[in-house]
Amino acid sequence: MTDVNETRLKELVDRVHGDLGGAFSVSLVRIGHEVGLYRTLKEIGPVKADDLADASGCAPRYVREWLSAQAASGYVHHERGLFSLTPEQALVFAEPNSPVNLIGGFDTAAAMVENQPKVQSAFKTGRGVAWGDQAGCMFCAVAKLFRPGYLNALVQDWLPALDGVVDKLKAGATVADVGCGHGLSTILMAQAFPNSRFIGYDFHADSIAAATAHARADGLTNVRFEIGRAQDFDGRDFDLITCFDCLHDMGDPIAAAAHIRKALKEGGTWMVVEPMAGDTLEENINPVGRLYYSASTMICVPTSLAQETGIALGAQAGEKRLAEVIRSGGFTHVRRAAQTPLNMVLEAT
């Protein structure tokens, strides 16, 4: 047996212990969100465990154990028998519109675990797992995961970073949001630019139904949603076409790029928002790359392989590979217009 370096072994075991602590916390965080423990703690803390239980309508013994686990994780602050949320903890767990709210990430992690049997089988067959066949409400979890980033950056930073696009939207433009999912990105743009018309396309019927319901609830009249694939959706002469965190999920993103180019007006713009990534594995060996490679294995690659062609770019394709795909559709200019720690925004014309 090869000699074991005890220092490296301890470092690895310590890291895995930390990872397991996070994994064990997935259910607890989701419970805390769903039953209102984080929200109530933000409102009334510092507070004793039994008082939090009473205020949230939960059983005291469960709440005491939950709070102990949260304090040990560093998700809740504990001092002299009182529990509270620091401002930073509140941003992550208790404020739904915060740019760093991460509840959707825990929902996505739970859906990935539920998805394991299907993806595990695909490891042997090489086949995909269709988006609509993925476990639980994967689409709901992913929508919640991306919501904070879109809510805090799309209208404020990403669209203004595109050349001349905001002026067109203010005056009145026609926009297609391809791969719109539950329609959050489409609705945010429609709310910000009432003179423009927006159409959200997605190949998943249940997501289109959810998006339509969201738009109706918001009372929007300048947006509609239709079932359509990226490579052959209806509609022409768009001033702007957007794809949010979905190009890498497509079975044939090259065909999608070609169709999007034809669907744009002369002088139109394609905005492609994709996960932040370098062009090599070495560049992506970091906390963000770790999240995206894992999600890509369980969600993105299976989704692509279940479609025609099944190119399976993966969530860490990187700007160079993405630009190659975009240019293959007939676009001549591709540039990174904006970025966040989790996303890059590419402008194609």
Image (spheres, rainbow, N blue to C red):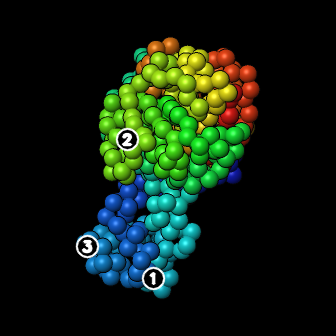
The structure residue drawn at horizontal position 38% and vertical position 61%, both measured from the top left corner, is 33
The structure residue drawn at horizontal position 50% and vertical position 18%, both measured from the top left corner, is 231
Query: Label 1 is placed on what type of residue?
Result: Pro
What is the spatial separation of the Cα atoms under label 1 and label 2, in whole angstroms?
39 Å
Tag 2, which secondary structure?
A: helix
Residues 335 and 245: in front is: 335
The residue that mark 1 highlights is 46
Tag 1, which secondary structure?
A: loop
Query: Label 3 is placed on what type of residue?
Result: Gly
The residue that mark 2 highlights is 211
The residue that mark 3 highlights is 57
Q: Quadrant of the C terminus?
A: top right
Choose top left, top right, bottom left or bottom right for residue 291: top right
Counting from the top left corner in percent of width and height, residue 27 is at 37, 55
Counting from the top left corner in percent of width and height, residue 183 is at 43, 41
User: Which numbered disc, 1 or 2, marks the residue closer to the eye?
Assistant: 2
The structure residue drawn at horizontal position 44% and vertical position 49%, both measured from the top left corner, is 144
